[in-house]
Amino acid sequence: MKILLHICCGNCALYPFKILISEGHNLTGFWYNPNIHPHDEYNLRLESLNRLSEKWKFDVIHTEKYSPQEYFRIFNIQDEDIQDILNKYPGWSIREDLNPPGRCKRCYGLRLENTARQARQHGFEAFSTTLLISPYQDFQQIAATGRRLAEKHNVLFHLRDYRPYFREAMALSRELGLYRQKYCGCIFSRVERNRKKAKGRDKGY
Ligand code: SF4
């Protein structure tokens, strides 16, 4: 099957690629992650993926420059307020929709909708995402989002639970020297992680 695989980072791409290629699928990666904050972190994750794609020889479609506005827009945060949030981390946590699980539901929707659209436009039979390997993500929500968007865009969603391979994936990532992030990606997850760290409750990501 010809599959467009949304890639959240190189680490999470390792096992989905290994497994799907070994089953004979034709895979192309798709990098679309405007949620990642800040730009330096975005570049670190993208460069790490680029190194992996060169080493393992697979193609990755890039449709974006760094555009965090696309992420903030799903929360109706205006451009002029973004800088305020970036500078001061104001009391966003009092806004229900800026907390998980609602925040992540919208984030999955944004990234997977663009993947489904690209898959449909470029003749792929199915789309999927490497988010499905992470025990830190909401698997059921990703599955529900994928199914909904498959129906909307008339393209299959390839669903597989890769979570049992997560530990092996991280071991392989260390072996390959890939960049391993310390938080999920958005500015909110970064602040949450820093707060946990300050309270000594950070167990790593
Ligand atoms: S925590 Fe992760 S999945 Fe949730 S909104 Fe932030 S980047 Fe997206």
Image: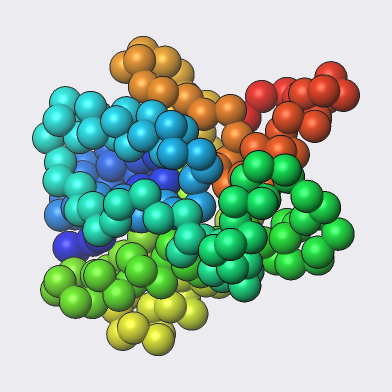
Q: Residue at x 15, y 46 (%)?
A: 59
Residue that appears at 20% across and 53% down: 61
Residue 63 screen position, x and y as percent? 25, 58
Which residue lies at the image location 67% right of the left edge and 50% below the top edge? 85
Image quarter for residue 149?
A: bottom left
Where residue 72 sits, quadrant-wise, is bottom right
Q: Seen in the image, is 4 located left or right of residue 187?
A: left
Q: Is residue 202 above or below residue 99?
A: above
Pick whichever, 200 or 162, lies toward us. Answer: 200
Considering only vertical position in the picture, is 166 above or below 68?
A: above
Q: How many marks?
A: 0
**Place of residue 105 in the rendered image (x, y in percent of width and height, measured from the top left):** 61, 65
Q: Considering the image in quadrants, where does the C terminus appear?
A: top right
x%, y% of residue 65?
A: 30, 52
Q: Position of residue 172 (x, y in %)?
A: 38, 21
Asked if residue 175 shows in the view, the reply is: yes
Quadrant in which the N terminus is drawn = bottom left
Q: Nearer the viewer, residue 173 or 45?
A: 45
